Image (cartoon, coloured by chain):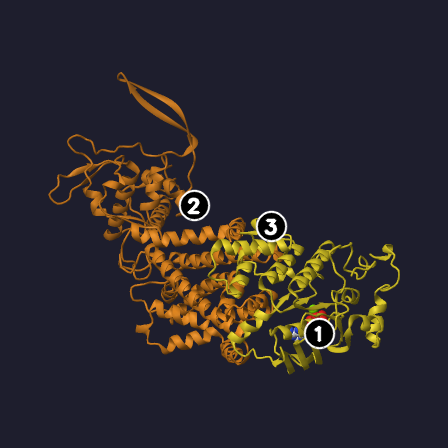
Chain colours: A yellow, B orange
Amino acid sequence: MKTSNDRIIGQEIVDDRESVTFGANRDKDFSQEPMCLSGRGVTRVFRTGRITTVAVDHVDFDFHKGELISIVGESGSGKTTLSKMLLGLLEPTDGHIFFHDKLRDISSGHKRRQYWKGIQAIFQDPFSSYNQFHKIDSVLLDCINMRGGKSLPKDQKIEMMTEACSFVNLKFAELTNKYPFELSGGQMQRLMIARIFLLKPDILLADEPTSMIDACSRATILDMLLNLRNETGMTVIFITHDIGLAYYISDSVYIMEHGKFVESGPADKVILDPQAPYTKRLISDVPKIHEAWDLSTVG
Amino acid sequence: MKRTLKNIFHTPRFVIGFIIIAAIILVSVIYPIVSPGNPMKNIGQGSFIAPGTYISSYDVATVPVYDSTGANTKIFELGEDAINNRLRVNMSVEDRETMIGWLTSLKESLGEGQLLAGENANATVTEEVTKVVDGVETTTQVEEEREVVLLENLTSSDADAEKLAELWIANYNDEVKVKGYSTNAQRRNIRQLNTRVSRMMSGGTITVSIGDLQPKELKNTDYIPLSKVANVINLPLGTDNFGRDVFRELIASTGTSLLIGLMAGVIATVIGLMIGLLAGYVGGILDDILMFIANLFTVIPSFILLILINYSLPASSRGAVLCAVVIGFTSWVWTARSVRSQVISLRNRDHVNLSKLSGHSLLRIVLTDILPYVASYVVMAFILQVSSGILAEAQLSMIGLGPEAGNTPTLGLMMNWATKFAAHTTGKWWAYFPAIAVIAFISFSLNLMNTGLDQVFNPTLRD
Ligand SMILES: Nc1ncnc2c1ncn2[C@@H]1O[C@H](COP(=O)(O)OP(=O)(O)O)[C@@H](O)[C@H]1O
Ligand SMILES: [Mg+2]
């Protein structure tokens, strides 16, 4: 399902990636799939002193199994806050979140740990995502332990870590006994993907995973992410400020403005026929989406 | 970790501070082992004995100078200024004033007559010298260089001592009646003074006799090795008002004060760290309660609190340890506050979120994801707590609320005694200055170490 404008859609794609599959199952109707994460009236208000910020304002959403959902919005629109609530790292001030059709219950430490076996994340800034005092090995070993592999023999663990690393084009033998800060931003983010490879969660939440790394590494990272998704069939919630990229990779899109979803639906419908003025503005900011592309205009 | 340590030890400020404090600690640990003794023992009677080396005069007199073999004889040439030294030490200012007074009276009674010049004075004076060579009397004119020493120019200062003594020797005459020195007692005093002065000037022998020993003759070129004197007391810093050796006391005090500072620092840092971590990471109502307590401690200055607590404790129970505990318990607040604010900014960091997502327990997150990030700060805070603990002890002791002086002196107590006995107003610098200097050195070196650490841990502060 490759199209001729693979290489140019979205500001983050600068080179031609053979293996990137366009919006994987664009034709598939995900609304028939079982629900895996949904929310009703989810709200988060921050109070610092006298100032109150409504970061996320009564949003409703339904994420289906296997779907790749993009949440698009400008910086400060509340995307990260929403993702923290989805991950259970931040309490919603109001509203309910449903996990596999049941009201999510993460009230105890044990329940939270169970929940995190099913939902994992890649954060925006790889440089602050790692504990700088821990070696790379311990990051990967934590994942094996979490999947119940604590008692596995040592060489099997090494084999699993080597496999995970080679999936993201890293050599475990070169990384072992090193610290994360000895890697480049792109390598760190790839290590994050290796982590997800080991954990194989049902849902992956990727919060602008390519926005803090150099342009050359971006396509590689996206490539690996989409490969992983194709391989495991997991649900991916992809957060980005880049509507072109969202159109390029996702099945459905949620457009977020000032903490509210102003428009949502299948990617084709939302982006090719936008209704909300905010969506139109976002699209007009990206030069030409479905016209013939001229490579010289891409910076 | 290794790299950080290497960086730290490449920071000149840290290294200088470290060397000073290490030297102070080493001396305070090693000296009592090498030279054991009770620092609180009164070794001298009378207060504020000046720094110096004291030898027993009895032992000096009994040191054998001449024995059958002469092996113990130590004869040296007298130095150039031997006489001057002797006069300086042995002829008191009053003696010199008496001499000037007597000579002045003599000059007045001589009327027109001049005082005779001293022996070595230079001025050109022509003298007729009559010599008898082989039964023939020859008279020759001899020109001599003589400086006319004017009595009016002489003072009782050390510089004039030798000239004064020479003038005295040249002019003293027991027969002459001098106005104002006519009573028998006065004349006897002057005669005794003359005996002493002429002995000092002549360098003759003294005969000493002690007990059963043979009387022996001491020449002024006889020297005795200090090692032959049985009892020598070295007081590099003199004694304090009680007659205690200040040097020994100072070293013992430094040890105790460092220990108090260390204990207070450990207590304050541990409490501050725990409260800061708990309040910062757990947050919510616990944070509110802990910060309310911290605010109480902030509003009431900790020094006032210290005074109140120490005042309410009976003096007999106020040992160094209790004092350290009280100081520690009143100074954790700012460590707690700053750890808390650091933890609050850390707890929302992505590496903490990732650790949560990896299923780590709260304790593990606090210990492995939060604590290492505040560790450098805590080390720095600890160093400052030690320094301020030592200062707090000194301040408390100065106002008499420090540790009770059982058998452990502290730097603060030494200063307290020195002030009480007015050492600072009577110029007995050795009683208070060393303690002040040690306190200054300790806090200087600790603060220097701290700025060195700051340079390593907060590279933005560099230059
Ligand atoms: N911990 C917080 N305390 C106070 N305000 C916050 C906090 N986190 C986010 N906000 C505010 O919420 C709004 C949304 O932030 P965020 O979710 O980070 O946006 P985005 O990820 O879309 O850039 C912003 O206005 C931000 O200032
Ligand atoms: Mg964000």
Give the Cα distance between marks 2 and 1. 100 Å
Above or below: residue B225 compared with residue B125: below
Where does residue A150 sit, x and y in percent of width and height? 48, 62
Q: Residues within 10 Å of mark 2 (few under 14, many from 20)?
A: few
Label 1 beta carbon within 8 A of ligand 1: yes
Q: Please tell me whether mark 3 or mark 2 is closer to you in this view.
A: 3
Residue B38's tag is none
Instruction: Name the quarter showing ligand 2.
Output: bottom right
* Residue holding disc 3: A171
Q: Which amino acid, mark 2?
A: Glu
Judging depth in this view, the residue of A50 and A73 nearest the camera is A73
Where does residue A239 sit, x and y in percent of width and height? 71, 68
Residue at figure coordinates x 75%, y 72% from the top left: A252
> Which quadrant is the C terminus of chain B positioned in?
bottom right
The chain ID associated with circle 2 is B
Q: Please tell me whether mark 3 or mark 1 is closer to you in this view.
A: 3
Residue A78's tag is 1
Q: Please tell me whether mark 2 or mark 1 is closer to you in this view.
A: 1
The answer to which of marks 3 and 1 sits earlier in the sequence is: 1
